[in-house]
Amino acid sequence: MKVLVIGGAGYIGSHVVKELMAQGHEITVFDNLSSGLLQNLFKENDFIAGDILYKDSLDKAFARGFDAFIHLAAFKAAGESMINPEKYSVNNITGTLNILNSAVEHNCKYMVFSSSAAVFGEPKYLPIDEDHPKDPENYYGYTKLSIEEFMKWYDKIKGLKFAALRYFNAAGYDPDGVLYGLEQNPANLLPIIMEVACGMRDKMKIFGKDYDTPDGTCIRDYVHVTDLARAHVKALDYIVKNNESLTVNLGSEKGTSVTEMVEAARRITGQPIPADYVERRPGDPACLYATSKKAAEKLNWKAEYSDIDTLIDSTYKAYQRYNKEHK
């Protein structure tokens, strides 16, 4: 199929592109490079430098004629979304409506959307399944939930078939070592651990050590980015084959605590990784992890690379290679 990957130069997007290529699809990447990297592009694919806020550039892209598109272009910092909701309204919501309108105008009727488990908010039970109440605790999560609602209406009115994939923490790097462009200004745990391990920052903070968990630190769900990429491609295949929309959670089925992640990183990297325990951050639940039972049933998907050692080892190798080339 001819597939337009919006946000395909980003961290998750580039891994999705690599998996699509492996399955023989013809790819065009659309990205404004605000967080994506030229380094993440493959020479075999077309690249359109464009912004989802400008509908004319989306119209020109979709006019090329695509069978499907994958939407990964979003701001994703939950904390920032509570300080600057306007930024998230304009990019995530207005930008997505531009995409949906251009897609249906140009008869592109299959869409995979990179949603988020942030749509759920504070867990009422664990593991979180697709029917869990949706009550986002931050504006970022609200934008993702709103987009899911828009897609349902576009399906009902315009026949746009979609797959919405919800997950918590994308982590790790391409095990083949082809992709190693680092995220810019990362806020997630594993990149921060790696920056300390590689000497890019002196030490890190662990927020809270008195949670109701075995070691007192938060437990989170980390899914390897290659597993996520495989899920995007499987979801695309599913909606095209069955001509029906799909919403699934993607989880590792069990969480990993912050302390477990730091200690495993010390073991694998051989670096001391200094860390200070500090006060909890407001709004951080003790445990967050999802079940992937529906994804297993519908997509024959399971996390294959999301064990803690693969997550850390693949990330450390990417950081080492990047730092070696940028000395």
Image: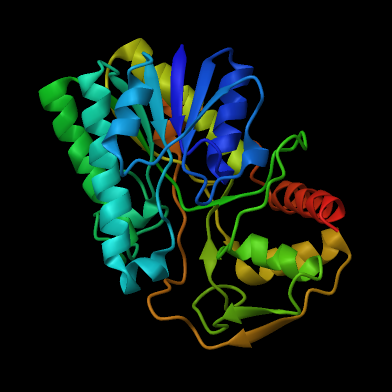
Q: Is residue 125 left or right of residue 142?
A: right
Farthest residue, direction left: 157
Quarter of the image with the C terminus in it:
bottom right
Tag count in the figure?
A: 0
User: Residue at point 49% right, 77% down?
Assistant: 212
Question: Which colour style is shown?
Answer: rainbow
Query: Which x, y percent locates residue 113?
Result: 37, 36
Which is more toward the observer, 50 or 267?
50
Which is more toward the observer, 185 or 129?
185
Q: Dividing the picture into quarters, in which one does residue 155 lie?
A: top left
Farthest residue, direction bottom: 279
Relative vertical location of residue 255 with respect to residue 100 in this rendering, above or below: below
Residue 247 showing in the rendered view = yes
Query: Which x, y percent locates residue 177?
Result: 77, 37
Which is more toward the observer, 260 or 224?
224
Query: Which x, y percent locates residue 274?
Result: 77, 79
Q: Dividing the picture into quarters, in which one does residue 157 lie?
A: top left
Q: Is residue 6 left or right of residue 111?
A: right
Q: Dividing the picture into quarters, in which one does residue 261 lie?
A: bottom right
User: Residue at point 73% right, 66% down?
Assistant: 195
Q: Is residue 326 left or right of residue 298?
A: right
Residue 124 showing in the rendered view = no
Relative vertical location of residue 86 with respect to residue 156 in this rendering, above or below: below
User: Residue at point 43% right, 40% down?
Assistant: 72
Which is more toward the observer, 291 or 54?
54
